[in-house]
Image (cartoon, helix red, strand yellow):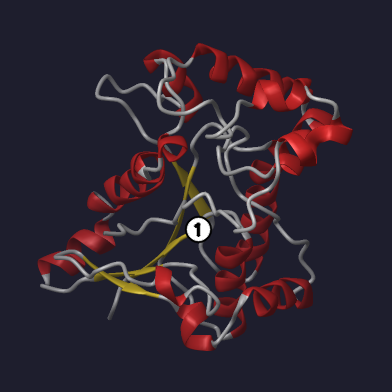
Amino acid sequence: MSVEVVAYGGGVNSTALLVGKVQRCERPDLILCADTGSELPGFYTYVTMFSAWLVERDFPEIQMVKWIRKDGSFESIEDNCIRLNMLPSIAYGHKGCSVKWKRQPQDKFVETWQPAVEAWARGEKVIKLLGYDADEPQRARVRDDELYTYDYPLIRWGWGRDECEEAIKAAGLPSPGKSACFFCPSSKKREVFALRENHPDLLARALALEANADLTSIAGLGRSYAWSDLIRSDESQVRLMFPESPVEEPCGCYDGGNED
């Protein structure tokens, strides 16, 4: 029998994936969620609530995993950036933070998880479920490897973003909203101002991280501009001074897969 692992990211898509699995009585064997140590407080609250909801329906609880250094200590993305005097890799156009703090901790956990070890010993692959929806089929390109086969239930079900939101609402659950680090360089300007309004302490830490970075190729957390300049500007002048990109720029994070 196939072994299924859900890579749960804490956002709308992966939440809808699990809601759909509950609806279809398709119980996975394991649900993993990576804790970068730098998420917004609402992320942790939602994961705890949703995990309890799943357990009530005889699904596995959501297991949190973290990236651990060779000395056995945990280092968040924030701590890593401060230590190395840099910003998250997505600020420079790379996806290293997702690979290091999301995919690798999950894969490391599964490496010693007995059902997976036994499946591999039988010559079988573990099925990893990823929450890419029908509106983003271009993301469903993670190649199968020696250990994993990747599956995209939302695409198979024909669920786009709207269907995902509707499924969560129909299940009686609140929407989880966006899952991202509080200093994510892909944040919209309105999200930076919302951070100032709702979590001024986190904004202060984001600005400290930006000020600590040795920057040459980019201006700051906004890539082409610094968050500190954005905050100092008068809000009435924000659109003039810092126009939004006409193209929606996702942070590029993904839940456990390895995109090439």
11 vs 45, left or right, is left
Q: Is residue 202 visible?
A: no
- x 53%, y 87%: residue: 157
**Residue 139 position (above or below residue 46):** below
Q: Which residue is situated farthest in the right direction here?
A: 236
- x 29%, y 78%: residue: 2
Q: Quadrant of the C terminus?
A: bottom left
**Residue 164 position (above or below residue 115):** below
**Count of numbered marks:** 1
163 vs 119, left or right, is right
205 vs 255, left or right, is right
Q: Which residue is mark 1?
A: 8
- x 77%, y 20%: residue: 232
- x 52%, y 78%: residue: 154
Q: Quadrant of the N terminus?
A: bottom left
The picture places residue 7, in percent across and down from the top left corner, at 44, 59
* Residue 200 image-quadrant placement: top right
What amino acid is found at the position of numbered circle 1 in the picture?
Tyr
34 vs 46, left or right, is left
Q: Which residue is situated farthest in the front direction here?
A: 240
Mark 1 crowd level (few <14, some 14–19, many ≥20, 10 Å Cα) = many
**Residue 100 position (above or below residue 227):** below
* Residue 30 image-quadrant placement: bottom left
**Residue 233 position (above or below residue 58):** above
The picture places residue 33, in percent across and down from the top left corner, at 48, 50
Quick one: 17 or 196, which is closer to the camera?
A: 196
The picture places residue 97, in percent across and down from the top left corner, at 40, 39
